[in-house]
Image: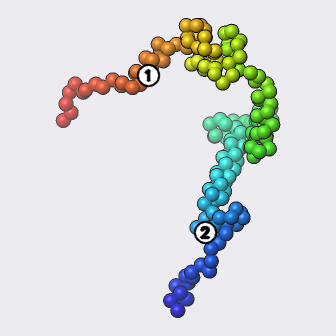
């Protein structure tokens, strides 16, 4: 009798996720399991971001006052870039396997930038961004253009900020 007065009922049984993933859902997550609910929220956020970026590209990314005319040539270029982003937003299963295969085929074997020796997995990456063999891994052996002195000075300056006390006490 108390249940009829409050309008609350106990669930009749466990509810499966509406996406048929095999897990149990709840009314708080729209009858979805927590994983499917989080995925749905992420997709909605991405759709909102895409819509806002398209709007900003179509309307112009200026000050937003609306007084500046939109040039049709710029709009065509912007639409082309949006379409390419939309194509790359497809699931990674469809696009990822073909792009990964093409990138590996174009890249070729890893080679030392000084002597062109094949290094494979044993190559050493330098801070200048190049890959070297064991003989040329040190900065003095390959004419490294990275400025280690300035990098060290910047790291020390960031780690040890200057602390100055006030000269006069505030009242």
Secondary structure state at the residue bearing disc 2: loop
Residue 43, percent from left and from top: 68, 52
In the displayed structure, would residue 77 be above or below residue 6?
Answer: above
Residue toward you, 110 or 82 = 110
Q: Earlier in the sequence, mark 1 or mark 2?
A: 2
Q: CA distance from mark 1 to mark 2?
A: 51 Å
Q: Residue at x 28, y 25 (%)?
A: 164
Q: Residue 120 occupies which quadrant of the picture?
A: top right
Q: Position of residue 106 (x, y in %)?
A: 79, 25
On the image, the x and y values in percent for residue 125 come to 60, 20
**Disc ID at residue 155:** 1
Asked which secondary structure carries label 1, the reply is helix
Task: Give 92 or 165, whichever is nearer the viewer.
Answer: 92
Occupied quadrant, residue 56: top right
Mark identifier at residue 26: 2
Judge left or right: residue 16 versus residue 104. Answer: left
């Amino acid at each position: 009798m108390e249940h009829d007065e409050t309008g609350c009922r106990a669930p009749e049984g466990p509810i499966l996720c509406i996406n048929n993933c095999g897990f149990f859902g709840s009314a708080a997550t729209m009858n979805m399991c927590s994983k499917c609910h989080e995925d749905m929220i992420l997709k909605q956020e991405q759709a909102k971001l895409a819509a806002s970026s398209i709007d900003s590209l179509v309307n112009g990314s200026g000050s937003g006052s609306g007084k500046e005319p939109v040039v049709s040539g710029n709009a065509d270029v912007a639409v082309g870039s949006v379409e390419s982003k939309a194509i790359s937003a497809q699931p990674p299963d469809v696009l990822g396997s073909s792009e990964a295969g093409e990138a590996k085929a174009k890249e070729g074997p890893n080679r030392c930038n000084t002597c062109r020796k094949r290094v494979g997995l044993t190559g050493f990456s330098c801070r200048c961004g190049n890959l070297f063999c064991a003989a040329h891994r040190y900065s003095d052996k390959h004419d490294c253009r990275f400025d280690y002195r300035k990098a060290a000075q910047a790291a020390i300056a960031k780690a040890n900020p200057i602390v100055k006390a006030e000269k006069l006490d505030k009242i």
